Amino acid sequence: MNDLTPGAELETKTFDVTRADLVAYAHASGDHNPIHQDEEIALAVGLPGVIAHGMYTLALVGRAIGEWTGGAEVVEIGAKFVAPVVVPAEGAAQVTVAGTVGERTDDGLLPLALTITVDGTKVLGAPRATVRA
């Protein structure tokens, strides 16, 4: 668990995302859109390659929050999907989640300022998370 004092920087978390992860997520979520598994189809629709599910990427943010806060209640989590997470056929894409603790609100909630990147490019815009810690 990290220091949750307002202004504290949270330990950066990096998650490897492989094609096998995308297959497992598709089975768990029911989202079998071929852009998440088939290179040819992803390229045909104008994508740079097979991409991770947006909600899988956001789930990694939730995982980071859980690790940072020791499992505190997540009251709000959200973001805009601004760039694809391209997952290579071999190896992995690395999703990096960084955060800073905001000022506790009057009702005791703790906002987290987040940055989610792959190779230095923001993949989630306007990310927001609030926890009850």
Image (cartoon, rainbow, N blue to C red):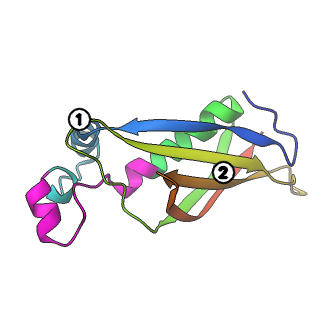
- Quadrant where the C terminus sits is top right
- Write down the quadrant of residue 51 in the picture: bottom left
Q: Amino acid at mark 1?
A: Ala
Which numbered circle lies on residue 75? 2
Image position of 94 (left or right of 41): right
Of residues 19 and 27, the one nearer the viewer is 19
Magenta-drawn stretch contains 40: yes
Which numbered circle lies on residue 20? 1
Of residues 93 and 32, the one nearer the viewer is 93
Alpha-carbon distance for marks 2 and 1?
30 Å
Q: Is 19 situated above or below 103?
A: above
Image position of 75 (left or right of 44): right
Q: Residues within 10 Å of mark 2 (few under 14, many from 20)?
A: few
Name the residue: 23% across, 49% down.
30
Q: In the image, residue 61 lies at what x, y percent?
A: 54, 46
Q: In the image, residue 105 lies at what x, y percent?
A: 86, 57
Residue at the front extreme of this rendering: 119
Magenta span covers which residues? 38-57
Mark 2 vs mark 1: give the one in front. Answer: 1
Magenta-drawn stretch contains 51: yes
Q: Residues within 10 Å of mark 1 (few under 14, many from 20)?
A: few
Residue at the left extreme of this rendering: 40
Residue at the bottom extreme of this rendering: 46
Name the residue: 87% across, 47% down.
6
Q: Amino acid at mark 2?
A: Val
Q: Is 81 situated above or below 19?
A: below
Q: In the image, residue 73 lies at what x, y percent?
A: 67, 40
